[in-house]
Image (cartoon, rainbow, N blue to C red):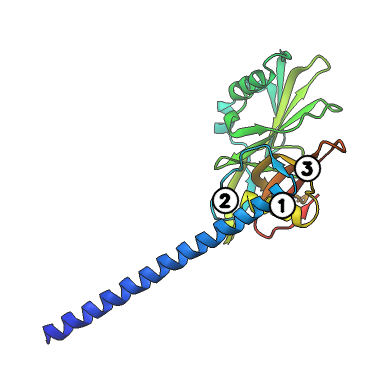
């Protein structure tokens, strides 16, 4: 074997690899600089139109996938962990638990959020994994939604966990379904929060002298789906306020395709 020639070949290969890696690094750096410049331009446009952002813009991973959530059937092992007597539990469906309290659980106006969180963490299986939705005053129901890797998953239906109240603002029971999530499909680039705001501006849904007062990244299932499986898309939820007109609107922006849902 000609070791001198072999050594020369390895040196050439090594140099080519170094050149390739250097090119990749420069290309990535250039792309990042362009993205920064573009986002700076977006901020300038917002400033020129007196559009203010009243919240800190969340940062997310640059890429992601859709989620598939499958309702779990309640097993005896799961039931045994629920901190309520078995007589207080019923199962209209294998995937849905209905719990009834012997005595109503009072909730006062002071520190309401802390009291609700304390109840959920104490009496609900995996209660800390749920985030609160908006209270339904007419039906006296408070929906909660499961989280996936720190982000809330919103369903088309009422909620994966629903607290039921009486007319005295006391909790009288709850209904719970548990979803098991897995990522599905191929990975996509995800739109940043500022890009989502730009989309609203481009579609004239965010106009001069208006303000962004809330922005949240999460996963949304927008279509009513029969059965135990639901598909969730990564989305930005943005609230826009026009103080002069006294208007407030909330929009969903698909973080993959950029489609806007009003």
User: x, y (%) of residue 154?
Assistant: 70, 42
Q: Quadrant of the N terminus?
A: bottom left
State which mark lies toward you, 3 or 1: 3
Asked where in the image residue 58 lies, by quadrant, the reply is top right
Q: Determine which residue is flagged by label 3.
A: 210
Q: Judge whether residue 234 can be spotted in this image.
A: no
For marks 3 and 2, give the one nearer the viewer.
3
Q: Position of residue 180 (x, y in %)?
A: 59, 44
Label 3 close to label 1 by CB (< 8 Å): no
**Local SS, label 2:** strand
- Residue highlighted by disc 1: 253
Separation of marks 3 and 1 at Cα, in angstroms? 18 Å
**Where 105 falls versus 200 (above or below)?**
above
Q: What's the CA distance linking mark 1 and mark 2?
A: 22 Å
**Mark closer to the chain start, 3 or 1:** 3
- Residue 124 is tagged as none
Please give left or right for residue 165 compared with residue 45 in the image: right
Q: Give the SS element for disc 1.
A: strand
Which numbered tag is attached to residue 182? 2
Q: Considering depth in this image, is 207 or 129 the residue closer to the camera?
A: 207
Precedes in sequence: disc 3 or disc 2: 2
On the image, which quarter does residue 239 sit in? top right
| 3D distance between C-alphas at marks 3 and 2 | 38 Å
Q: Position of residue 21 (x, y in %)?
A: 36, 69
Residue shown at the point (64%, 47%) measured from the top left: 70
Select label 1 or label 2 by which is in front: 1
Mark 1 vs 2, N-terminal side: 2
Question: How crowded is the residue under tag 1: few (<14 C-alpha within 10 Å), some, or many (20+)?
Answer: many
Identified at 26% across, 74% down, the residue is: 14
Is residue 174 in view from this perspective? yes
């Amino acid at each position: 074997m000609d070791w001198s020639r072999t050594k020369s070949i390895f040196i050439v290969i090594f140099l080519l690899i170094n050149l390739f890696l250097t090119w990749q690094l420069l290309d990535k750096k250039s792309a990042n600089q362009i993205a920064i410049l573009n986002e700076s331009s977006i901020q300038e446009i917002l400033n020129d139109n007196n559009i203010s952002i009243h919240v800190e813009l969340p940062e997310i991973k640059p890429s992601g996938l859709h989620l598939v959530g499958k309702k779990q059937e309640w097993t005896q092992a799961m039931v045994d962990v629920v901190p309520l007597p078995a007589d207080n539990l019923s199962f209209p469906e294998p995937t849905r638990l209905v719990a009834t309290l012997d005595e109503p659980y009072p909730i006062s106006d002071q520190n309401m959020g802390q009291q609700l969180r304390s109840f959920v963490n104490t009496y609900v299986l995996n209660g800390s994994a749920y985030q609160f939705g908006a209270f339904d005053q007419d039906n006296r129901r408070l929906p909660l939604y499961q989280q996936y890797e720190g982000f809330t998953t919103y369903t088309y239906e009422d909620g994966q966990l629903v607290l039921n109240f009486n007319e005295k603002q006391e909790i009288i029971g709850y209904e719970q379904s548990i979803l098991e999530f897995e990522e599905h499909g191929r990975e996509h680039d995800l739109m940043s929060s500022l890009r989502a705001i730009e989309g609203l501006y481009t579609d004239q849904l965010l106009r001069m002298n208006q303000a962004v007062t809330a922005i949240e990244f999460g996963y949304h299932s927008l279509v009513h789906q029969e059965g135990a499986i639901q598909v969730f898309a990564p989305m930005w939820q943005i609230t826009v306020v026009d103080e002069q007109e006294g208007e407030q609107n909330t929009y969903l922006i698909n973080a993959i395709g950029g489609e806007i849902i009003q």
